[in-house]
Amino acid sequence: MNESIRVTMIYGSAREGRFCDTVADWLKAELRDVGGCELSILDPAELTFSASGPDEFSAAIIETKLEAADAFLIVVPEYNHGYPAVLKALIDSAYRPWHAKPVAFVSYGGVSGGLRAVEQLRQVFAELHAVSIRDTVSLAHAWSQFDSQGNPFRPAQMRGPLIVMMRRLFWWARALRNAREETVYDSAAA
């Protein structure tokens, strides 16, 4: 019943010098303490994309990691009131592996903390038959919340919302995994 949840953490940026690494490193350390999950990383900076999407090798990596996941944790910046194009290309490169799986967001940016990007992503994931978790971790002015070594200035303040979000993500992951084991999702509409 308490079998480990397979979480794929998806980096939402591939920009050189991105702040995504700082946020993701903090998350990885926190998730080791939370326990209950096996973490896999999907980083678009390690893949090859063109205007038409990922190359064949990268598409296979994406498909494999998405298929193996019980849940997704997306670390997303807000660029110009939206989410990065490379994240959209990664999301759009697969369809069925997203079905009936939960998605949680850790967003960062300026004054909005990335919430506008998250709201747009909720619409995208609804179309992919994924369940977005209502709770998010949103880091406004994120670069001012970490020291030069990537440690948060107020770890307890950041940890609280993360724990709540992850507990709900795990709940949904277990519920949806059990449902997928009982009935293939696509057959529910047949």
Image (spheres, helix red, strand yellow):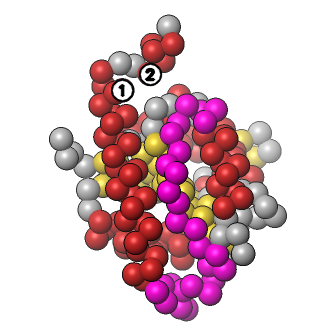
Q: In the rendered structure, which amino acid carries the disc numbered 1?
A: Arg
Q: How far apart are marks 1 and 2 (CA)?
A: 6 Å
The local secondary structure at tag 2 comes to: helix
Residue that protrudes farthest toward the left in the picture: 1
In the rendered structure, does residue 13 fall within the stretch colored magenta? no
Q: Do the residues labelled 1 and 2 touch (CB within 8 Å)?
A: yes
Residue range (magenta): 126-154
Residue 169 in percent (x, y) is at 40, 50
The circle on residue 185 is 2
In the image, taking residue 87 as reference, residue 168 lies left or right, namely left
Q: In this view, does 116 lie above or below 60?
A: below
Residue 187's x, y, as percent? Answer: 45, 13
Displayed quadrant of residue 40: bottom left
Q: Which residue is at 35% across, 18% downward?
A: 183
How dense is the environment of label 1, judged by Cα within 10 Å: few (below 14), some, or many (20 and up)? some
Is residue 70 toward the left or the right of residue 12 in the image?
left
Tell me the amino acid under the disc marked 2. Tyr
For the N terminus, which image quadrant? top left
> Looking at the image, which residue is at 21% across and 45% down?
3
Q: Give the residue displayed 59% in from the left and 73% down from the top.
A: 139
Report whether 88 appears left or right of 29.
right
| Of residues 41 and 188, the one drawn nearer to the viewer in this rendering | 188
Q: In the rendered image, is residue 20 in sight?
A: no
Residue 91: x and y in percent read 62, 43
Q: Mark 2 Cα within 10 Å, few/some/many (few <14, many 20+)?
A: some
Q: Which of marks 1 and 2 is nearer the N terminus?
A: 1
Q: What element carries label 1?
A: helix
Q: Residue 180 carries which label?
A: 1
